[in-house]
Image (tube, helix red, strand yellow):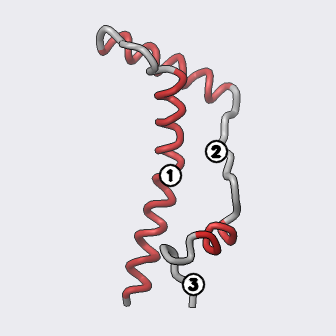
Amino acid sequence: MPYVIETVANRAAATGQPVEIELSVLSGQCLDRRIPDIEALRAEVGAWQEERNGAGATVDWRFTARDAREKLRRIYPATP
């Protein structure tokens, strides 16, 4: 049963990674200065989102799942 728990946890982490990456990009490209109020923040994020979606931005994975399993074998156990 521990394998099932680890698999579910790994999948949950994997789905969060693109979100974390996008937030990091947003932070570096849009939120690198002080924003005076919530309305200005919404406008900035909205403009950034429109530009990012219009450009068809995607997450650029640096290595495959197989490579990740090999590099991180202590964290991700081998599948049965």
Image location (x, y in percent) of residue 80: 57, 91
> Label 3, on which residue?
78
> Label 1, on which residue?
17
Q: Name the front one of labels 3 and 1.
A: 3
Image location (x, y in percent) of residue 14: 51, 60
Image location (x, y in percent) of residue 79: 57, 85
**Identity of the amino acid at label 3?**
Ala
Using the rendered view, name the quadrant where residue 29 is placed. top right
Mark 2 in CB contact with mark 1 (< 8 angstroms): yes
Secondary structure at badge 1 equals: helix
| Real-space CA distance between mark 3 and mark 1, rounded to the nearest whole angstrom | 21 Å
**Identity of the amino acid at label 1?**
Gln
Q: Residue at x 68, y 46 (%)?
A: 60
**Identity of the amino acid at label 2?**
Val
Residue 8 vs residue 21, the one in the foreground: 21
Mark sitting on residue 59: 2
Image height of 29 relative to 56, above or below: above
Mark closer to the chain start, 3 or 1: 1
| Real-space CA distance between mark 2 and mark 3, rounded to the nearest whole angstrom | 25 Å
Image height of 15 relative to 24, above or below: below
Q: Residue at x 50, y 20 (%)?
A: 30
Secondary structure at badge 2 equals: loop
Residue 1 vs residue 65, the one in the foreground: 65
- Disc 1: CA contacts within 10 A as few (<14), some (14-19) or many (>=20): few
Secondary structure at badge 3 equals: loop
Q: Residue at x 70, y 59 (%)?
A: 63
Mark closer to the chain start, 2 or 1: 1
